[in-house]
Each structure stands twice: as C-alpha cells, then as structure tokens.
Amino acid sequence: MKAAQKESGKVRFTDYDYSHFYYGAGDDPLNVLGSFGTWLEDAFPSGYYLYAEPLHSAPSTRVRVRNNKTGQVCDLLNMASYNYLGISYRDEVKKAAIEAVQKYGLGASGSPILSGTFDVHEELEKAVASFKGKPNTILFPTGYSANVGFISALMRSGDNIILDQYSHASIVDGSILAKSKTTFFRHNNPLDLDRKLANMKGKKLVVVEGVYSMDGDVCALPEIVEVAKKHGARILIDEAHSTFLFGPNGRGVAEHFGLDKEVDFHLGTFSKSLGGQGGFVCGDQTLIHYIAAFGRSRFFSCNLSPILAAGLVAGMKILESEPQLRAKLWSNVAYLRRRFAEEGVDIGKSTSQVMPVHVHNDHKVFEVAGKIQDRGLFLQPVTYPAVPKNKSRLRISISAAHTEEDLEQAVQVIAGVLREEGIQL
Amino acid sequence: MELPFADAISGYFEIPIDNARRLLPPHLEPFELHHGSGILSMTVFDMPKSPVGGYRSVTMAIVVVPYVKGAPGERLPKAAVYPYLTGTNAFMPRQIGSSMFHLPHWGDNLKIDLTREGKSITAAVAAGKDPVATLTISEYEWEPTEYVYQSFMKDSSGSYRAEIEVKGEISDHEEETGKLVLHEHEFHNGLSIPDVFDVPFREVWTRNAVQTFGPLVQIQTA
C-alpha cells in the first residue's frame, strides 16, 4: 500500500486480525468477547462477510450462494469447493446414498468400536486399501480426526514429532494431544529438517503433506525421505489434497515419486477429491488394530454415516473406472497455470489443483475478493494468521468438472479486478 | 517521554518454548507461535537525535502474552515483549534505560554497525573484538504506521509494564529473506543458540519514527 493511501491515525479493520483476540482481560473468559465484538462490527461488513456464505445448491461448478452482507442469493462460478474430480453430485453417488438412507437411516448411531460399524464401512475400507495397494485401511469420521487420532495413538510424551512449519492444524493438534516434543522445520526444507533431526534422541516421527493446502506446492518427498531415513525417523504423509489425484494410479504424491514403500504411514481424506467426508489411514493389520484401540478421536466419536460411506464406495468406483477424470483435472490445472502466467497473476509455487492467487496486500484482499464475488466468482480470501504476513491470497480449487470457458471466465474476472485495484501484475 | 529514531530493525525468530520460558520471569507467559515454539526478537535502534546525543542500541526480547485491560474502546497492543537484555554503544542511554525503564543492560559499550546494501540492512554487534550477533533484514513496502506495543520489565526494584506508541513508517513482511548469526558469547547466556531459527519468520523495519512511552506501571514489588 502506498503511503498516501492511508489516512494517518485511522485504524483499519485489517490492522487487527484473529491473532489479536486470543487473550482477554481479567479472570472471566468471556471478557475477550468485548474487544472482539467491537472489531467484528467493522470487520464483518468490510470483508469477513465473505466467509461461511451458505450454498443453496450442490457444490458443482455453478453454485447458488447467499451473500452474507446483502442477503441476496446469487448464481456464481464455483472456484472454491474441493470436489476436485466433480464426483460428489454424480447420479451414481446420489443413487447409492439414497439407497443407503433407505437401508440404514440417517447415522451410524454408535462408535465404530461398539455398534457403529456397518457392512458398508467395511466395503469402503476394502475399496480404499485395494486402491492404495495396502493391506488394510481404518476409517475416521473426518480428515481432522484422522490426523489427530493417528498421531496421538502412536506417539507419546518424550517422543519427537517433527512437522513442516505449514502443517495443517489437525497435524499440530494431534501432536499436542500426543504430548510429544514438537519441533517445526522450515517449509519443505530438507536441510533444515536435517539440522533439526541431527541431535534428536528417541522415537521420531516426521510428518509432511503431499500437497500443502494453502500454497498448493508439492512436498519435496525424495529429499525428506532421505533425511528422515538417515536419522532413523518414521514418516507419515498426509495426502488429503493428493490422494486419488497424483501418481500413475492416483494413489498420491508418495506413488508419484515412487516412494510408496519408503513412507511408513499413509493418511488421506474423502472430502477433497471425492467431495465427501471422512479420513483414513492405510497399513498392515496390526497397525490398524492398534490405531483402532488407541485412536481416541475415532474411538470416542460416532462412526462416519453409512450414507456417506455408501456414496464414497460409489465415488471410488467412478474414479477407478474413469481415469480420464484425473487427466481432465491436470489439463485444467495446466490451462489455468498458463493463462494466469500470461496475465501476470502470481500463483506462487503451486503446481497442483490448489492455486493461491497472491494479492500481496493484507489491507486490500477483502476488497479484491468482494469485487470478484460481485462479478460472479465464488472464492474466499485467506489472510494472516492462516498464511504469513503480506501473503494474503484468494484460494482457488480447480475441478475436473470445470470447462475451459469456466476457467477463462475466472481468469478474466480475477486479472481484471487485480488490475483495477492496482495489484502488481 | 518521546524518543525519535531514524531506523529500528527487528527480526523475529522461532525458539523452543522451554528456552523462551527460561528467559522470562515467572509472571510472564511466552507467546506461542506454534505449539512448542516461542518467539525471540532482536531489535537494533539507530537514534542519531536522542536527548542524550546520538546512540545505537540492541535489544534481545521474548514475545509474551499481552496485558489486555478490557476497557471500552481500549486500543489493543499489537504485541508485547520482555526485553531480557539490552546493549548500547554509549554510557548515558544505558544509565537512563536502566534507571528509568528498568531494562537489564549489558555493562559495557558495544560496537553496533549498520550497513545498507540494496534493500537490505545489516546490524553487526560486537563487544570489543568479540563478535556478538549479526542481523540482516530486508525492506518490503513502506507505509505510515501508528500502533501501541507493551514492554514488560523486571529488575531488583520490581516488575513493570509500559505501553509504547510508535508513529512513523513501517515495512514488515514474512518473506524469509533475513538472516541471524549468533556468536558464542556471554551476551547470549540463557539462550540455546543451536535451537534458534537462523531465518526470521518476520522482518520489521521502522524508520523516521517516534516512540512515546506511556506511564510506567509497577505490577510487582521486589
């Protein structure tokens, strides 16, 4: 922002963010709400209204969304939902889910270790294990609970967990619950990992992600595996954004690099590529039994709804029988990368279907995102502290279901608004 | 009290939370950047026009949980720090810093050099012939700034808190372009040097600014 643009002395809502409201005054926990509420009165209409706008339709490429500020329901081009393969609203998936609701009713009505495991859960576990080329799979109600449950099931107080500094909150929270010593290494930096592991004694677990969810960059897995092995550390890869997409068979980034066997633990989710819900970990039978016994986030949760499980089984059949969906997704990614490059739009180091459009201005990102929505695109800004200072961005998710016309529309709107707002292109 | 300065450069570095806690008095809590990670800051001030003559200083601090009053319309602090050691290149500011602001000071004059190269600035701190620390940060975009931060102090007379308003121009970013070299030296007693990230996650450069110190509040007696 140029100096002249800021009226001296005037506090902008973007001068503060969630990080400033972590601590409150006095002895009453509710005291924190006073200053937070005052700030939100300004922040909500100025930009935070763009979060959690309710969809009135399936998360396909075109969505009906209610604007949180105006209350108006608008038809928008969806550049925000995961649903990378465009499977969740396919007729086969809906039919399977409808049949499941007729057969099972609404929910699992129990923990997976007691009464909440259904035949369709076992069917889904087998389908995932077969797809991933692993002996067994264990399901979790969400991707978040998969990381929290798996990490805290395996690691103990006094052990070491070494995380990429951009790790997802579920990985960090799993480490907190494990009560292990947590050490962060610089993002995707094997040299720093080597330095951090150098003097570490005892059990060590290195956790990385196949694709990082805010930057869309791919893990430097070959170098990280080499360093971890050198120091005798086990490796967990969270393939939330890469399972069903990367690699010759779509198994993920580990397969993409030919390191499927070198990585010790493989975790994934159903909410991204399949547009469903739930998480999973693959491994041998004993590991799976152990995680079932010690994974508290699963043990003490109701199981994944059998309706979701049935829909996911149908979704997996589609992705296995239609590998062209992956090809279409990668073709869409290549198209958008090329067009953004031609327009001078900065997408950082993304090489995946997660594409951040960098705005480089924490004070302007909400205005930019609001204008983009007004011109027909559904996407959200991501700001500090979710991403580093001055690295505010608009987060784009590309789907195989997008047409070239959809993508071109997105490019025109985004590049046009960035230019109008004086964002360097 | 107003203290004008030409430049202040700060690097913020991750350190293990246990190390941060060791450098703090018991009544302060380290601010967690991530689970298990505290924040070390190193700031070098260049004050060519201070009331006691031109001087430079270096402050090593731990970022701590701020004190929020909860008063209506309260101007929230952008950050809070506990400077655990300050050093200067002149006697008078050291004397004033110790007596008026209760800041723990390195006893002798330090040599503090500032070198600009392109968009970067490097501060080299030495005690006599011994190098102490070298901090390099880079600029991003300049904009006017006006904010409040808190500083907590402790010495043999008690514990204190001050609110400090800064007005000037600021450049801050998290581009990871800076660098910190800490040399083995008594100046770093209590700090586990190998555990300090050598690249700042945030680089802040403030220039042509004034710091205004609010009234000192004693929060604990000795």
Image (cartoon, rainbow, N blue to C red):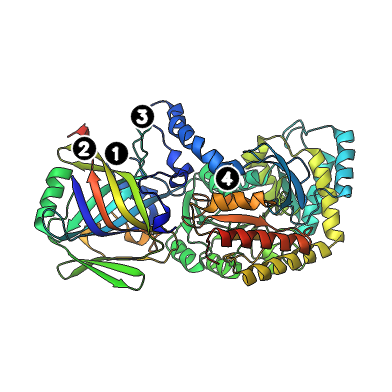
Left or right, A66 with respect to B91, comes to right
In the rendered structure, the residue with mark 4 lies on which chain? A
The image's mark for residue A152 is: 4
Left or right, A396 with respect to A364, comes to right
Task: First in sequence, mark 2 or 3: give its number.
Answer: 3
Q: Are dots 4 and 3 in contact, CB under 8 Å?
A: no
Residue marked by disc 3: B71
In the rendered structure, the residue with mark 2 lies on which chain? B
> For numbered disc 2, what is the local secondary structure?
loop
Task: First in sequence, mark 1 or 2: give its number.
Answer: 1
B144 up-or-down from A323: above or below: above
Name the quadrant of the N terminus of chain A: bottom left
Q: Position of residue A256 (x, y in %)?
A: 69, 68
> Depth-wise, is mark 1 or mark 4 nearer the camera?
1
Residue marked by disc 1: B26
The image's mark for residue A233 is: none
Q: Position of residue A39 (x, y in %)?
A: 47, 37
Name the quadrant of the C terminus of chain A: bottom right
For residue A77, say whether it is visible: yes
> Depth-wise, is mark 2 or mark 4 nearer the camera?
2
Mark 3 Cα within 10 Å, few/some/many (few <14, many 20+)? few
> Depth-wise, is mark 1 or mark 2 nearer the camera?
2
Task: First in sequence, mark 1 or 3: give its number.
Answer: 1
> For numbered disc 4, what is the local secondary structure?
helix
Q: CA distance from mark 1 to mark 4?
A: 30 Å
Q: Position of residue A319 (x, y in %)?
A: 82, 58
In the rendered structure, which amino acid carries the disc numbered 2? Pro
